[in-house]
Image (tube, grey):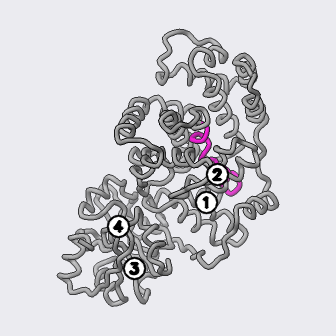
Amino acid sequence: MALAARLERFLTGKGIAYRELEIDQVLSFDAAVMASGRPQDEFIRATPLIDINGVVMAVHGYNTSLDMDLVHKQTGRRLQPLTARQSARLFADCDPGFQPPVGAAYDLPVLVDEDILGYPRALMCCGTDNTLLELDRTSLARALADATQGHLAIRGQNNDERDALTLEEVADKLQKLYRLPPMPALALRILRLTANSEATARELGELIEFDPSLTAQIMRYARSALFNYPGQINSVQEAVTRVLGFDRVAHIALGIASVRAFEVPRQGMLGMDQFWRHSLYNAFVCQRMAPKCQSDKGLAYLCGLLHNFGLLLIGHLFPQEFDELNSLRETNPDASMHSLEQQVFGASNDQQMLAVGHGAIGGILHRLWELPDPVVKAAGMHQHDGYHGEHERYVLMVQLANGLLKDRGIGDEFNPDDVASLASSLGLSDGDIARLNEEIDSVSGELDALALSLSS
């Protein structure tokens, strides 16, 4: 069936004319927009919202995002975006993430941003992952006949016509225009120590113990139920030799010390609380899958731990834009981070380089900090589906870990990944994935507690 069943019944029953556009099967609405080859400013999207009084569908342009203050003024309600699980229940006849912006087909009240009613034509989801729907202005007006109109959205800009910058050009511009934070001194000393193949647990312990806060965090980690060590741990050196091992202590200490280079708020889906939660879970999953992927466990852990540092750099350099990005992430759970970053940073010529995405920005920072090449590549390419190239396994492990964590509400984006394809590329079976999921569930409480302690 090309259209979702309820949408087809509604359009047919109302006699509303439409045209179906077939596309290759895709994983998200953003991918469908790109696959169509049509201008982005012809597309509209739905953002379902909920409060104690029920669900409302907001309909607005693809290149815009809802301004929740305007929605509140329009409705007098403090609405929040539906979770993926709530959306799946409400739009049961639709593929996940492809709910059509025709709320009347689902007996939902609709708010419509007044600008889209002037579109000469509108392209939209129709509930399936291989078809788009096109309505002319008259048909769109009939489909939204009972909607409440108003000014609801933050306007974005289409950046497709701009010349793309290479990463070398982005790196050069970043260094010329902004004062990039240097690697903190302690993190640099830890990094240099780990590069020495003859470094000892005693040297690492003594280095960490110069910093009381870092010492406390490493000790808390070693004493956690993640490791179930039965005896007493009285020093960092004991944590290294008896429980954690040299590499794990070095890597978690490096991550903690490096984060001190950034001033980022704790709150929101992109704030420091969620950053640490995402990073620790991803690092854990990467480390657990590494042996099956013929990869180094310590390096895999570090790739997972540091892959999202680009978000911290954006938050550090551009606090106002970061707040806007954080807000857009909250109100647009089905949108890709790349599309939101383009919206925030593509509107300014001075900041156009940042529209390449936080992954690329993080990879640039890691390269300037002279971190290991797989860490640089995992950060720089984790937003790129279908990556093939240098240090591919580490990139794919980070991507697969992110895909597994999305079902748990962990991460910075929730449009679905092709987990099966990523697992197959890494040589992992369905049984391997099932065991990974079981392991994640078994340590979730400890990882959550550790993340909270690191962000506070």
Decide which of tag 4 and tag 2 comes sooner along the chain.
4
Quadrant of the image occupied by residue 232:
top right
Give me the residue at 37% from left, 89% from top.
137
Decide which of tag 1 and tag 4 comes sooner along the chain.
4
Cα distance between the residues tagged 3 and 1 = 26 Å
Can you see residue 386?
Answer: yes
Q: Give the total number of marks visible in the rendering.
A: 4
Can you see residue 456?
Answer: no
Residue topped by disc 3: 123
| CB within 8 Å, label 4 to label 3 | no
Looking at the rendering, the stretch of residues picked out in magenta corresponds to 302-318
Quadrant of the image occupied by residue 7:
bottom left
Residue topped by disc 2: 310
Decide which of tag 2 and tag 1 comes sooner along the chain.
2
Q: Nearer the viewer, residue 97 or 271?
A: 97
| Few, some or many residues within 10 Å of mark 2 (<14, 14–19, 20+) | many
Give coordinates of residue 362: x percent, y percent. Answer: 66, 51
Residue topped by disc 4: 129
Give coordinates of residue 153: x percent, y percent. Answer: 48, 72
Prevailing secondary structure of the magenta residues = helix
Decide which of tag 2 and tag 3 comes sooner along the chain.
3
- SS at badge 4: loop
Give me the residue at 77% from left, 32% from top.
192
- SS at badge 3: strand
Q: Is residue 139 above or below residue 266?
A: below
| Few, some or many residues within 10 Å of mark 3 (<14, 14–19, 20+) | many
Pair 4/3: label in front: 4
Residue 314 on the magenta segment? yes
What's under tag 3, amino acid-wise?
Answer: Leu
| CB within 8 Å, label 2 to label 1 | yes
